[in-house]
Amino acid sequence: PATFLSWLLAGICATTSALSLCELASRIPLQGSTYSYCRVAGLGKTCAVVAAACLTLEYVISGAAVARSWGDKVIWWCAMTSATDAAEIPTTQSTAASAMDESLQIWQAWLFPGQIVNIPALLISLACTILLLLGVHESKNVANFFTSLKMVLVAFLIAGGLALFRPSNFLVRPFCPYGAAGVMRGATSSFFGYLGYDEVCVVAGEAIKPEKTVPQAILATLAIVTVCYVLASIALVGMEYYEDISPTAGFPAAFAAANVQWAAQLAAFGEIFTLPVVVLISLLAQPRLTYSMTRDGILPPIFARTSADGNLIGGTLLWGIVMVATAAFVPFTYLDDLISCGILVAFCLANCCLILMRAKDYDEQAASEHRHHSPHGELHHKYQLLRALLAYNILCCVASLLWSHTMAETDNGSGSHTMDILASFMTMAAVACYVHIACQVSPTKLHGTMENGHNYQGRHKARPARSRDMYDVIQNQDDHDASLSDGHSQDRVSNGMFDPTALPQAQNQYFKLPCVPLVPCLGIAINWYLICQLEALGLVLLVLYLGGTVALYRTTLRS
């Protein structure tokens, strides 16, 4: 019954990072999303590669996961249709369940032979890859059509569920059967449903007036999907008792249980018909990410190969093959936590990037206001802030682990005061670290500079900071933190990577998030808490995946 709280909490958590992405995307409208932000903010190539690996989980692997889920829904729908046709409407629930189980086994033998290859998932992934290879214009028209149809279907499901709403199913005791820890764990799992809103950032370089349209698109998307998720979860739980809800086909099974067979058929067919658009859009973003990496010299040129009309056929084909293989052979249960954990790490990096960008703005403003400015002092401040951000992330992670353990023990009736004290201590340490970060980023540090007993800023009107990020901070930082010379950087600009004078960043016209660094630091803390709610298998898989990616980059791709 408390599922809607998990969806609402996941939406709030997503919003904290989305606000940071709004400023970054409108300020740096380049292809690559968090990968590009890490490069611009000066985190170095290794952090940028980690961000790209996390985004790959969101785009390619999540697309494969959705395709696998779609394949399971196809099998379930075929089984339900066969069971209904064979025995009209069964007289008892036991007869209906028996007919359904028998039909399900038959269709699984045909479409999921040996429980190894999910044929529907393979086919839909292959179809989406081929469609993207045909061109973006065709893909855009298909995506717009199916997205509109999907919104109509969601409205039907919500309205139908509320029409069959039973208060006895919703108002149960206890209202949170799995306690607060269950709500938090549900929020982490629900976060998977919010993945994709940041794909707007990947195509920000192709947007018209990205300083306005990109933030609007991100926030509007989050608001719409949050409302839909909350209403749909309330409607579903009200239709059917929560322990009887099907994990594979929630609404169709609930309509069938209520003996509204036409609605069950429509819901099942609608999900099957519209869900592939998610697979299509997920794969659409990945070639643009690897295109940026290729231009930075991280990936081989094949990922930037384009067709005569500019379609990224190289990256689309290679990543399409990866998605097809993953969808066909890897179960969804192994991908859910891995994807959620990866994108939460990417969001933490994006929040760190915004803090670094703001600190750079204030440093440049200080340089324009003070007569004496030392580049060495600015570099020292940068590394000091980087160390503070690293410490803050570690403290948030440790505190989240302790609080998760404490909440689980409390729900089991075996709480420990020692764990409470330790968790509180780590939380206070994280707060102290935040204060240290705020002191380095806050513009108040620029005030009060005195010269001959007078306020220097009072005699020199402050000028808007004109950050050099887009000019010379996209650096080929190797692992020794060496940067490109200004001449080489200008060559990269002249080669068409970006036009700095046309960017919102250079004109101070971008969306600017208030309450920095409070909002991004809050987003970092929330993201780590959600990560710590995941199953251990997902965390281990992410560590192995990122470790392997970094090792591959340092040993092979880097050369």
Image (cartoon, grey):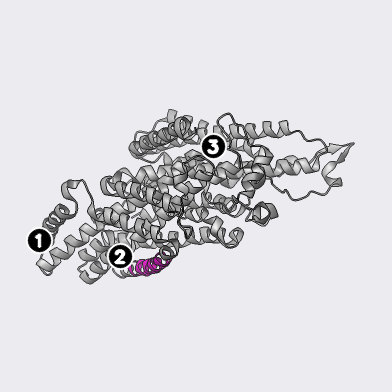
Q: Element at badge 3?
A: helix
Question: Do tag 2 and tag 1 residues touch (Cβ < 8 Å)?
Answer: no
CA distance for labels 3 and 1: 61 Å
* Extreme residue toward the right, this view: 452
Q: Which residues are magenta?
A: 141-158
Closer to the chain start, of discs 2 and 3, is 3
Residue type indicated by callout 3 = Lys
Q: According to the image, label 2 marks what residue?
A: 273
Q: Using a 10 Å C-alpha cutoff, classify the residue at mark 2 as few (fewer than 14 neighbours), some (14 to 19) or many (20 or more).
A: some
Which is closer to the viewer, label 3 or label 1? 3
Q: Which residue is mark 3?
A: 45
Gap between marks 2 and 1 measured at Cα: 29 Å
Which amino acid type is shown beneath numbered disc 1? Thr
Q: Earlier in the sequence, mark 3 or mark 1?
A: 3
Spot occupied by residue 233 in the image (x, y as percentages of width and height): 35, 59
- Which x, y percent locates residue 544? 38, 33
CB contact under 8 Å: marks 2 and 3: no
Q: Is residue 447 magenta?
A: no
User: Where is residue 78 shown, x and y percent of the image?
Assistant: 19, 62
Name which residue lies at 22% across and 71% down.
262
Q: Quick one: quadrant of the N terminus? A: bottom left
Q: Alpha-carbon neighbours of circle 1 within 10 Å: few (<14), some, or many (≥20)?
A: few
Q: Is residue 25 toward the left or the right of residue 267 in the image?
A: right
Q: Nearer the viewer, mark 2 or mark 1?
A: 2
Residue bearing mark 1 = 95
Residue 375: in sight, yes or no?
yes
- The amino acid type, in three-letter code, at marker 2 is Phe
Q: Position of residue 167 (x, y in %)?
A: 31, 63
Q: Is residue 146 above or below residue 32?
A: below
Can you tell which quarter of the image residue 507 is in?
bottom right
The total number of labels drawn is 3
